[in-house]
Amino acid sequence: MMRVWIKFAKESPMRFLSHLDLMRVWQRAIRRAGLPVAYSAGFNPHPKISFASALAVGVTSDGEYLDIQFAELLGGTAFERLAETLPHGLKLLDWRQIPEATPALMSLVCAAQWELPLQAEENHMLQEALQRLLATSSLPVEREGKKAIKTVDIRPLIYGLEVDEKESCLRMLLASGGEGVVRPGEVLKLLRLPAIEGRLRRRELYVTSGHCFQEPMTVSFN
């Protein structure tokens, strides 16, 4: 048996692919590469593949992750073959073998970094809006639940917000996991930014190691 985390990018040609369709693309690529993915037991076995965090349709990313269990140890060229089978718009960036007893990557993810390129007029407008938002102790937003609309205070779950004037972009470090989730659209609405179709990008996902955030590929299991 061999358990692996794979980091990949989802580029513009694939940004309208749904979460379910993306899983199917990866399953087909793994089959074409001839990799022996492990299957669950039971009446309806399924491949032991899961994403660290779902990505909204229309959003691109440099920091997506798969958690995969293989039925046997893989040789050094296995992931080169897998990278070659991926369609245009998906790019395998890195991989690492992890201990089989490691909790599911989905359960470890706690934050996500987002980036939004800005237009010249937005750069100036955002500076004051950002300062006002960060100075606020409470930021209630309404979310539609299964039975009723509920109000959530997202302020404690916003870990970082900044405008990079040199790169002309807004960067957001937001909670994403079991402790709570902040949707980037909620923050952008509070900042009164216009429509962002095709502009938002997820740069990285983070897990907690001690008292700091770390990328999954760098966290230690010792």
Image (spheres, rainbow, N blue to C red):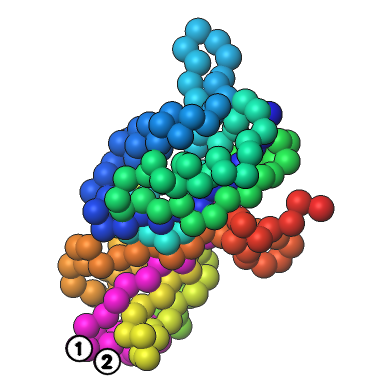
Say which of 211 and 57 sits in front. 57
* Residue identified by numbered label 2: 124
Identify which residue is drawn at 55% across, 10% down. Answer: 42
Q: Nearer the viewer, residue 151 or 129?
A: 129
Q: Which residue is labeled 1 in the image? A: 121
Depth order, front residue of 57/91: 91
Q: Which amino acid does label 1 sit on?
A: Glu
User: Callout 2: few (<14), some (14-19), or many (20+) C-alpha neighbours within 10 Å?
Assistant: few
> Looking at this rendering, what residue extends furthest in the top direction?
43
Residue 81 locus on image (x, y percent) = 48, 42
Whether 98 is drawn above or below 171: the answer is above
Q: Please give the label number shown on residue 129.
A: none
Q: In this view, does 29 lie to the left or right of 144?
A: right
Q: Is mark 1 on a helix, strand or loop?
A: helix
In front of the other: 161 or 144: 161
**Does residue 207 appear in this view?**
no
Is 120 located above or below residue 92 in the figure? below
Residue at position x 38%, y 59% in the image: 61
Residue kind at label 2, given as amino acid type: His
Q: Do the residues labelled 1 and 2 touch (CB within 8 Å)?
A: yes
- Number of numbered discs present? 2
- Residue at 25%, 67% (x, y): give it: 199
Judging from the image, what secondary structure is the residue with disc 2 in?
A: helix
Judge from the rendering whether residue 138 lies leftward or rightward of residue 198; answer left or right.
right
- Mark 1 surroundings: few (<14), some (14-19) or many (≥20) residues within 10 A: few
In the image, the segment drawn in magenta is 107-132
Above or below — where is 33 with respect to 83? above
**Where is the N terminus found, in terms of image quarters?**
top right
